Amino acid sequence: MSDVAPPVAALIEEFSKLPGIGVKTAQRLTFFILRSPTDQARRLSDAIIRVKESIVYCSRCFNITETDPCPICSNSSREQDVICVVEEPLDVLALEKTGVYKGLYHVLHGALSPMNGIGPKDIRIEELLKRLENETIREVILATNPGFEGDYTASTIKRDIQNELNLPELKITTLARGLPLGSDLEYADEGTLSRALEGRREL
Amino acid sequence: MSDVAPPVAALIEEFSKLPGIGVKTAQRLTFFILRSPTDQARRLSDAIIRVKESIVYCSRCFNITETDPCPICSNSSREQDVICVVEEPLDVLALEKTGVYKGLYHVLHGALSPMNGIGPKDIRIEELLKRLENETIREVILATNPGFEGDYTASTIKRDIQNELNLPELKITTLARGLPLGSDLEYADEGTLSRALEGRREL
């Protein structure tokens, strides 16, 4: 980048820091910004600052929000005795889109990953246990991602609940595993297919 | 996006306007910004504004620059009688990286594309003809992209030079076509292979 003007090199460098954006893509984005109208570039620039300035974490569920508690936590028409535990705010978004779930959430902000040095203190497990202790919860749905880290996180949380809290009535569930809709049995991996067999239901 | 806080939805929308960035990627980038330190987000936001405020087009070669004329045009140690015509500023960057080319540039800012309604007035052809008229140029290298639009642009420029200017001494060249380094003959497309055959050289 020695031959490019410093402000251009700087923007290429900043874009490259974003996940999944390599130098080539960063160059492409930078030259797109250069060509685009100033007010469009300013809208992007402002949106970045605004998101950092106005977004906080809900002190109850740790979802991202402009108001604390968040709109979901403060919506009294939602079921107050079910908590769905997810890894990221995007997971809340995905579940809300289904329109099926009417309870509350708890966002862990990550999954346990011994490989990457992410332990129980790095995600919001302690805060979940406190909620289960203080709120009257009937069911906790552990909706971490299917896969090693998500499954390990879910089983750790389940063990923590059973070891540290005295809640014999609490139902601990997880999302069903099986063939995704529109998928092809022929191409399903063994793990998914085994889970789909184990979880088979009467028609 | 109805359930997401408006500043988050706004940033997702602005990211989605960038080329090659779909909604899913825009969400990922937005949540990355949310998690990253405020000063990193601010550096990106500032870099976007700075690039728009400080970058101008060189009035001679139309490359992007902080100073007009640009460092290449004002570098008297470069050959002043060769112009390499390219479509985009990124092409200048790519050619400069080779370290082989020592002449000047002319950035068209696009290629002719009748399909997309991009005609001669939309790119810097007129400005190139003026330079050829006013500067003493020995060779013009038409380094547009190989492919229909680039080839059409190059042949149009060649025709314009020959029709509108009286420069019988001017050499008009184009970059060699052939097999790229490290490529596999077996997988080369017919067009590339035909060009490689036509342009074969004695060893």
Image (cartoon, coloured by chain):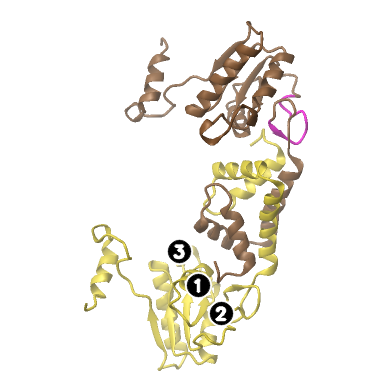
Chain colours: A brown, B yellow
Dot placed on the residue nearer the N-terminal end, 2 or 3: 2
- Proximity of marks 2 and 1: CB atoms separated by less than 8 Å: yes
Q: Position of residue B38 (x, y in %)?
A: 71, 47
Q: From what the image shows, is residue A114 above or below residue B155? A: above
Q: Position of residue B144 (x, y in %)?
A: 43, 72
**Rendered location of residue B149, percent (x, y):** 42, 68
Q: Type of residue at label 3? A: Met
**Nearer-the-camera pick, A154 or A86:** A154
Packing grade of label 1 (10 A; few <14, some 14-19, many >=20) is many
The one of A108 and B167 positioned closer to us in this rendering: A108
Left or right for B8, reference A17: right
Discs 2 and 1 carry the same chain letter: yes
Q: Secondary structure at mark 3?
A: helix
Q: Position of residue A147 (x, y in %)?
A: 47, 28
The residue stretch that appears in magenta: A63-73
- Mark linked to residue B92: 1
The answer, for residue A35, to whether it is visible in the render is: no
Q: Disc 3 designates what residue?
A: B115
Q: Amino acid at mark 2?
A: Ile
Real-space Cα distance between discs 2 and 1? 10 Å
- Predominant secondary structure in magenta? loop
State the mark number for residue A8: none
Q: Residue at x 62, y 60 (%)?
A: A11
